[in-house]
Amino acid sequence: MSRGPEDDRSLTDLDRTLARVRFTPRASLGPELVGRARTALAGLPRRMEWWRRTLGLASAVMLLGVGGLGVRSLLLGPAHLLTVDRCCQDLDGDGPADDGLLVVSDGGEGVRSLSIYEDQNHNGHYTPGDPIRFHRDGGDAGLAAPSGPMSTRAFCCADYDGGGLEDDGLIVVAHDPGDIAMAAIFEAGSAVKRRQLR
């Protein structure tokens, strides 16, 4: 069956007519839906009414809890960061007790960063001129494949994270004395558990 110009014109007219058609709900649709819901809830047995009230109360409590956490984070901002500067020990194994540990933690909990520096001016704390021998921010502790003999030094127990308890340990792995490959803080206890850097 072949189509002619009249068929194309009628299809174009139909397309224009359909493009002008608009569907809008009548003004009474909203109140009708609310009324039907009320009628359905009113027909529930008494024991179902108890569940409906319990669910409503639980929803309100959850909304208040989530809202309270949001307000707290807006007012207080991010977790309180603590910086702990512990000096002076021989952390890198090169002899003199001239190394310091600089740790930034979330209020004494999760460790954000860990740096080992050499206290060259011997003032007992980090100053901007002190060379950083090792630094680690977030992520897993990556340890490169050893190119030679390695030594591991463990230090326990001190308050390295600022949490208030002397329950933290430090492990330092070095290729050669003075060349630190990896360092990590762990919490000492019945089972040694490594602190994750965030």
Image: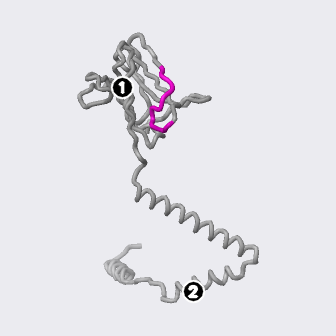
Q: Amino acid at mark 2?
A: Glu
N-term mark: 1 or 2:
2
Q: Quadrant of residue 57?
A: bottom right
For the residues labelled 1 and 2, the Cα–Cα distance comes to 73 Å
Tag 1 secondary structure: strand
Tag 2 secondary structure: helix
Horizontal and vertical percent for residue 3? 37, 75
* Residue appearing at x 75%, y 77% in the figure: 46
Specify the segment rendered in magenta.
154-164
Q: Residue furthest left?
A: 129
Q: Quadrant of residue 177?
A: top left
Horizontal and vertical percent for residue 12? 33, 79
Residue 32 badge: 2
The one of 197 and 26 positioned closer to us in this rendering: 197
Q: Residue furthest front?
A: 123
Q: Amino acid at mark 1?
A: Gly
Q: How is the image coloured?
A: one colour
Residue tagged 1: 100
Badge 1: residue crowd in 10 Å (few <14, some 14–19, many ≥20): many
